[in-house]
Amino acid sequence: MAHIYLDHNATTPLDEQVLAEMLPYLREHYGNASSRHEFGTRARAVVSRAREQVAALVGVAPSQVVFTSGGTEANNAFISGAAGMLKATQIAVSALEHPCVAKPAQALARRGWKVRKLAAGRDGRVDLADVALALAQPTAIVSVMLVNNETGVIQEVATIAEQARAARAWMHTDAVQALGKIKVDFNELNVHAMTLSAHKIYGPKGVGALVLDKRIELEPLIKGGGHEGGMRSGTENVAGIVGFGAACEFAQLRLAGLAPRLAALRDELERGLAELGATIFGADALRVSNTTYFALPGIDGETLVVELDKAGYAVASGAACSSTSTEPSATLLAMGVDPIQARGAVRVSLGKDNTPEHIQNFLRVLQTVVARLMHMSAMAV
């Protein structure tokens, strides 16, 4: 049985065109980009080209792009690196952040920092009044994601950045879930730092980037041979970086057409879910077009994910990086969702290869699975 993939916020399939760009640097062009001979020169040239491609997608100079092993490293690199250069005061992060922002922020408490969580409303947006309240205290770092990985809600990052700058704080945004789905412009967002990842935009796993304002300096998270302008030591993953660059170029080309097509599929999905009595989390806020996070009355989310997988549909019960946790979604709890309802949460995240038939068949299977689970629940009483 062929599975239908509906979990693109966890990762996306590697685009065939991206793979084609990568293959020569996995085979015959294997040079180290730091080497001075022809093999190294070729590798260095394609890394530079990829840096230009990534920079072009987010509207920055290539020199502002620091390649990393992924979004998690980039988030850690900024938070730890900024803390290494600034006086320990307060770091403010939204209560909606991915663990790879929340946990390094919490770790700063051991270094004398006060950690402040920014509240969110029931619609899944960061509370701007709480941001202002937080910034009334001396604050050095603020981090708010651009798009939430679970709900798909788009945060008001530019507005928060304006508040942060007025308070003389450095502003960071994790834009991993925004890239390739909406326009992402570093300068329009007014941030000091931004995190990106390749595998969310049909590129390879194991490569990401931290985009930095030219006027700030971080303490490097990884020290060694001085690669990436001294910001991230370690031999560059040339093939992965080439793939990231190509994925960014293709993302730019498909952006205008993909978003409305996925929005139409999402709307069809949500109409069907409404008929089943589902609650859609974040539905009252502006969201990216590919994401639906829902719960059905009386249905456990983990159980539903497993049953849908058996029926041939790959969905998620929350963030992929937290899939081993038995706790309700921290994002939903921060939104004020009842813990019992939060345990029922399931995420569908669409991608470029999904079709109307996928949605129609998914809804049909979902209805059957839900009816069976409800019957089993009634029999157990």
Image (spheres, grey):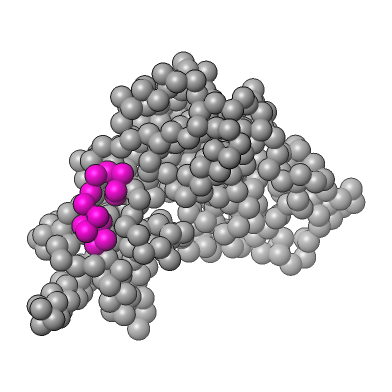
Q: Position of residue 317 (x, y in %)?
A: 33, 62
In which quarter of the view is residue 2 placed? bottom left
Please tell me which residue lies in front, 9 or 126.
Answer: 126
Q: Position of residue 279 (x, y in %)?
A: 17, 54
Please tell me which residue lies in front, 86 or 155.
Answer: 86
**Which segment did they paint magenta?**
332-344
Q: Could you tell me which quadrant the N terminus lies in?
A: bottom left
Q: Residue at x 43, y 66 (%)?
A: 324
Please tell me which residue lies in front, 194 or 325.
Answer: 325
In which quarter of the view is residue 377 placed? bottom left
Please tell me which residue lies in front, 152 or 49.
Answer: 152
Q: Residue at x 15, y 58 (%)?
A: 278
Q: Which residue appears farthest toward the top when viewing the image? A: 166
Q: Residue at x 38, y 34 (%)?
A: 118
Q: Position of residue 286 (x, y in %)?
A: 27, 39
Left or right: where 216 falls relative to 267: right
Residue 179: in sight, yes or no? no
Decide: is 82 above or below 179.
above
Q: Residue at x 64, y 48 (%)?
A: 68
Residue 129: in sight, yes or no? yes
Q: Any magenta on residue 322?
A: no
